Image (cartoon, helix red, strand yellow):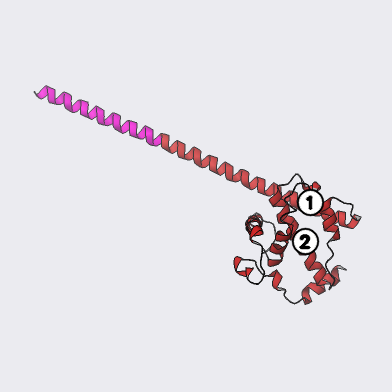
């Protein structure tokens, strides 16, 4: 089966849906204005996740399509109960990618896309043991993404805190330097006045 999929993927002609998404693709692949903000949000998150070391590749037209279709569901807490511990935007980011990759897999073996297992997963309905294994792997990936994002946020917060501490220390050093300069100036003025009085 895997060998068949690999051959199919290799022989598959390029699909325009697997090209990078951008606002310029909206003429050919329109997205509702209501969902556009969410697509941009997920694209931004996708870029950050790739920057964290996850091999997610480019944000494609296909993924953007599934972000649009799932935007009202994946961010709603009453759906995807197994994902309730993760923020809505994280669920949407990974779910859209999961739907997109599964759709492409079906396309590669020349079969109509059957999203039943994924849909049941969203509705928290029973799924087969094979699908359960695959989706458990998906949950593990989502947990890794969330952990990596939290670690990144922590590093950013630590850098910001260190930056603030460094700036505060610099301000204190500058203040001390200024006080020393004032003290030296006052001492010189006092000495000059004293010398002037002696001359008089």
> Where does the magenta region start and end?
173-200
Q: Earlier in the sequence, mark 2 or mark 1?
A: 2
- Choose between 107 and 48: the one closer to the eye: 107
**Where does the image place residue 35, in percent across and percent down from the top left?**
66, 58
Q: Quadrant of residue 109?
A: bottom right
Could you say whether the residue bearing mark 1 is in a helix, strand or loop? helix
**Where does the image place residue 71, in percent across and percent down from the top left?**
71, 56
**Where does the image place residue 26, in percent across and percent down from the top left?**
63, 68
Query: How far apart in space, not on screen, are marks 2 and 1 (Cα)?
Result: 14 Å
Q: Characterize the magenta stretch by its predominant secondary structure.
A: helix
Look at 68% across and 67% down and name the residue there: 61
- Above/below status of 83 relative to 5: above
Decide: few, some or many residues near mark 2? Use Cα within 10 Å; few <14, some 14-19, many ≥20.
many
Look at 77% across and 61% down and name the residue there: 99
Res 136 visible: no
**Circle 1 is placed at which residue position?**
139
Q: Is residue 177 magenta?
A: yes
**Where does the image place residue 136, in percent across and percent down from the top left?**
83, 52
Q: Locate residue 24 relative to residue 123 in the image: left or right.
A: left
- Choose between 49 and 88: the one closer to the eye: 88
Look at 77% across and 59% down and name the residue there: 98
Q: Locate residue 51 relative to residue 170 in the image: left or right.
A: right
How many callouts does the rendering have?
A: 2
């Amino acid at each position: 089966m895997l060998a068949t999929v690999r051959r199919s993927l290799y022989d598959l002609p390029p699909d325009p849906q697997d090209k990078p998404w951008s606002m310029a693709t909206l003429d050919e692949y329109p997205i509702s204005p209501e969902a556009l903000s969410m697509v941009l949000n997920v694209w931004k998150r996708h870029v950050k996740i790739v920057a964290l070391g996850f091999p997610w590749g480019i944000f494609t037209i296909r993924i953007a399509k599934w972000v649009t279709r799932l935007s009202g569901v994946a961010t709603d807490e009453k759906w995807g109960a197994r994902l309730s511990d993760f923020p809505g935007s994280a669920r949407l980011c990974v779910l859209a990618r999961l739907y997109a990759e599964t759709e492409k897999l079906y396309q590669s073996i020349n079969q109509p896309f059957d999203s039943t297992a994924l849909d049941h997963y969203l509705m928290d309905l029973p799924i087969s043991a094979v699908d359960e294994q695959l989706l458990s792997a998906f949950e593990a990936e989502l947990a890794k993404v969330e952990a990596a994002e939290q670690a990144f946020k922590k590093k950013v917060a630590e850098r910001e805190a260190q930056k603030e501490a460094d700036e505060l220390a610099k301000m204190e050093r500058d203040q001390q330097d200024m006080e020393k300069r004032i003290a030296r100036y006052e001492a010189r003025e006092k000495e000059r006045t004293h010398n002037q009085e002696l001359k008089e």
